[in-house]
Image (tube, rainbow, N blue to C red):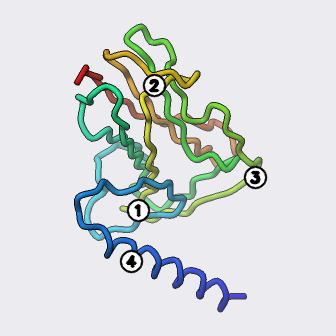
Amino acid sequence: MRRCLLLLVVGGLAIILAAAACNDGGEKPSPTSTAVATPTPAEPPFTFEGPVGIDLNTYGVFHNQGEEIHFTIFVGVSEPMTLYYRTTQRYDIVVTDSEDKEVWRWSKDKAFGEVLEQVDLEPNEWLTFDELWAQRDNAGQPVPAGNYRVMATSAHCDAAHENCGQLSASATLQLRTP
């Protein structure tokens, strides 16, 4: 069983490396969500106080109306810690307009398995989640130019699987007519 798992991991890495070698650098990377820790010898990509932190990167404040917007969520720890989850959902993203009305929710119409899971992280390790927003509302309609607030929330809970979704980060976007 371990040998099969090792072969799957090695095969997956080979595919990723082959795909990376084919990228000429002119394309944006295709964002995918990851549920594994990203270790690094350097400091986390953001600073925070306390044992757990979250950050949201929107790759700029100003975006042309109609272009896909890339979001990256980082959830990191400053000490060895276990993050607990009640479902397979790891995060949520909500976009609101200038009147604080919800425009788009990443998790809308998604189903998540009800499974108790945990992720162990060491200091300077973090979870990374990438998503795209096509600048469409929850009904699938294009959103108008204007100011928007993006809020990313980590779905992790405490050890009793309570107090979930308490950690969030936000950013402001301005969609401009091209």
Label 2 sits on a secondary structure element that is strand
Are the residues flagged by discs 1 and 2 in contact, CB closer than 8 Å? no
Q: Residues within 10 Å of mark 4 (few under 14, many from 20)?
A: few
Q: Residues within 10 Å of mark 1 (few under 14, many from 20)?
A: many
Q: Does residue 87 appear left or right of residue 48 in this picture?
A: right
Q: Is residue 154 above or below residue 41?
A: above
Q: Earlier in the sequence, mark 4 or mark 2?
A: 4
Name the residue type under label 1.
Glu
Name the residue type under label 2.
Val
Mark 4 or mark 2: which is in front?
Answer: 4
Determine which quarter of the picture holds residue 1: bottom right
> Residue beneath label 1, please?
125
> Residue beneath label 2, please?
95
Q: Earlier in the sequence, mark 1 or mark 3?
A: 3
Which dot marks residue 19? none
Name the residue type under label 4.
Leu
Q: Does residue 157 appear left or right of residue 43 in this picture?
A: right
Task: Provide residue 142's location: percent of width, then percent of height.
Answer: 45, 22
> Residue beneath label 4, please?
17
> Residue beneath label 3, please?
115
Q: Residue at x 38, y 30 (%)?
A: 170
Give the camera-side residue of 97 and 75: 97
